[in-house]
Amino acid sequence: MNPLCLEHCLTETEKQQFEENGFFAVEDAIPQEMVEKLIAAVDRVGAKHLDKDELPPDANFNLLDFVGRDESFIELLDWHTTFPKVWGILGWNIKLYHSHLIVLPPLPPDEHDKQRRLGWHQDSGRLNIELEGNPRPRVSLKVAYFLTDTSVPGRGNFSVLPGSHRFNQVEMPEDNTTDPEHAIPVFAKPGTAVFFDRRLWHAAGRNTSDITRKVLFYGYSYRWLQPRDNMTVEHVMENADPIRQQILGKSTGGMGYTSPGEKDVPLRSWIQENLGSEAVAH
Ligand SMILES: O=C(O)CCC(=O)C(=O)O
């Protein structure tokens, strides 16, 4: 793994923001050349998807399990400015359990003035019903890479209710069309990574601009959680280094998910060698 990771560990401020607000943003997490490479990959993969499903070229879509479809998507799995913050929050027994990319073209002009509530939700489906506790456990988080400019309102901004990861339920206005009062858009320039707790109530904003919004979502969880999509990554396993194999879901067997040995979690040894035993104490 890239040793530059050591320069981008989770900071105290980020940790505090994540605990209190349920999210934080890292500007310039990926350089402009990488943003351009990723946009080209999104466009290629997106065009194939639209073609296969016979969708119009300007359709909006949410494509699951995109990560194995281009080498540039694989590179982001353990990206040096972001991955250390993922293990800083969740620890070393982690993997990618889900990936999805969202392409959100501009709304048709006659939709712009219509008042509609955004699609507020917590991630992970049945976890929000079958797990006990209030709040329920964290279990996973997502890193969202913004490839297009959503640094001003009206660009389909990722929207959040800060601090709402601490509540199983949030109150919505009675009228069914407005958003909760404390909802905010997260402003993100191309290359920004936004980390958010799966329990954070969030939604995609409305895109009333003339720019198509493109965002990549990487979901990291503990290794014992079932993947949330097909995780079609067998074809990249062989050439991946051991830490990427761990991230892609490799395990020595059933027991290796919940009681991992050294071979299951090379990330643990890497952190221990580079940051000391204290860093892997749990
Ligand atoms: O597209 C967005 O801004 C929201 C993404 C989302 O809802 C999700 O990742 O579950």
Image (spheres, rainbow, N blue to C red):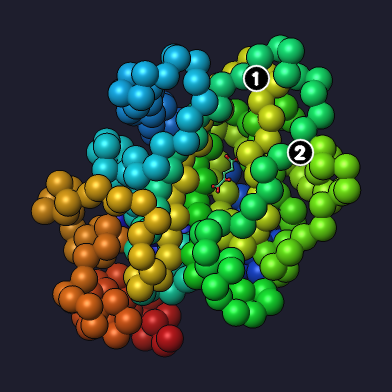
What secondary structure is marked by label 1?
loop
Look at 64% across and 80% down and name the residue there.
Answer: 133
Residue 233 left/right relative to 145 = left
Seen in the picture, residue 145 relative to 248 is either above or below; the reply is above
Which residue is tagged 1?
A: 107
Indicate whether 209 appears above or below 260.
Answer: above
- Residue at the image position 68 percent from the left and 55 percent from the top: 201
Identify which residue is drawn at 88% across, 48% down. 174
Between the C-alphas of marks 2 and 1, the distance is 15 Å
In this rendering, is residue 272 above or below 157?
below
Task: Mark 2 and mark 1 in contact? Answer it, CB < 8 Å.
Answer: no
CB of mark 2 near ligand 1 (< 8 Å): no
Q: Is residue 58 above or below residue 49?
A: above
Ligand 1 is found in the corner quadrant, namely top right
Expressed as whole percent of the image width and height from the top left, the position of residue 171 reads 82, 58
Q: Residue 235 appears at what percent x and percent y?
A: 15, 46
* Left/right of residue 142 with respect to residue 235 in the rendered view: right
Identify the image quadrant of the C terminus. bottom left
Query: Which residue in the protein does label 2 denote?
Result: 117
Provide the secondary structure element on which disc 2 rests.
loop
- Closer-to-camera residue (154/51): 51
Q: Is residue 46 visible?
A: yes
Drawn side of residue 73 relative to residue 81, left or right = left
Pick the front one: 1 or 182: 182
Q: Looking at the rendering, in which quadrant would you find the N terminus? A: bottom left
The image quadrant of residue 157 is top right
Choose the circle earlier in sequence order: 2 or 1: 1
Residue type at mark 2? Arg
- Return the x and y of residue 55 as percentages of the image width and height: 42, 19
Residue 120, image x and y in percent?
68, 48
